[in-house]
Amino acid sequence: MHITILNIYLWATDKHNAVFVNNKFSTQTINKMKTSFFLALVCLVALSIFVAWSRFETNNHNTSISISETDDTYKLKASFDVNHTVKVWRYVNNFIAPNSLGKSENDYFDVTTSLQDKTEFYIKESPGKLKIELNKRKNTTASYLRIKKMCEGIKGLLADK
């Protein structure tokens, strides 16, 4: 019997299904190996494509900012280049001082918060994305104007790049 590294590997990993015919592995065993190899290769290629796509998606330089307002709510939704996350994070934290959201620009947060002046709003931030919602009915006119001014400042900040 001819012993090779392949034979030893197959024997160690597939003892019960390895069938020797004339000192060679059966076609069934070889086909299982080929199928496993191609399945692993397809998974590796799919993972590579996904990683490349996700890096492109977060690093594209498209900026989208939408501000909407109804009788009850004021909303800002923004998506932007992840490289601008730090300046947006700093702007928001400077604007709501002495309060602060997150300890660093890499923090993800999704929270409804109350500021010292009793302004209550929802904010969701992650690298390259920002969402702010204010319920006008729960807040004073001064709170509404404060958040509106902050959102307009964020819009200007991202528009200027």
Image (cartoon, rainbow, N blue to C red):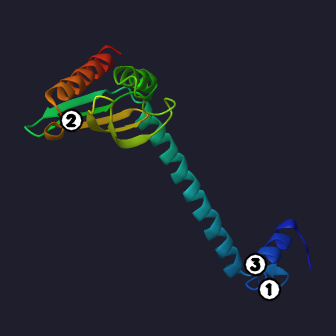
Residue 116 percent across, percent down from the top left: 33, 30
Q: In this view, which residue lies farthest toward the top?
A: 160
**Element type where label 2 sits in the image:** strand
Instruction: Please tell me which residue is depicted at 32% across the width and 17% down the height of the picture.
Output: 157
Query: In the rendered image, which quarter contains the C terminus?
Result: top left
Q: Nearer the viewer, residue 13 or 132?
A: 132
Label 2: which residue? 75
Q: Tag 1 or tag 3, which sits nearer the N-term?
A: 3
Nearer to us of marks 2 and 3 is 2
What is the C-alpha distance between the residues marked 3 and 1? 16 Å
Q: Nearer the viewer, residue 17 or 69?
A: 69
Nearer to us of marks 1 and 2 is 2
Label 3: which residue? 14
The kind of residue on which mark 3 rests is Asp
Q: On residue 150, which mark appears?
A: none
Nearer to us of marks 3 and 1 is 3
Label 1: which residue? 21
Residue 91 percent across, percent down from the top left: 38, 20
Query: In the rendered image, which quarter contains the N terminus?
Result: bottom right
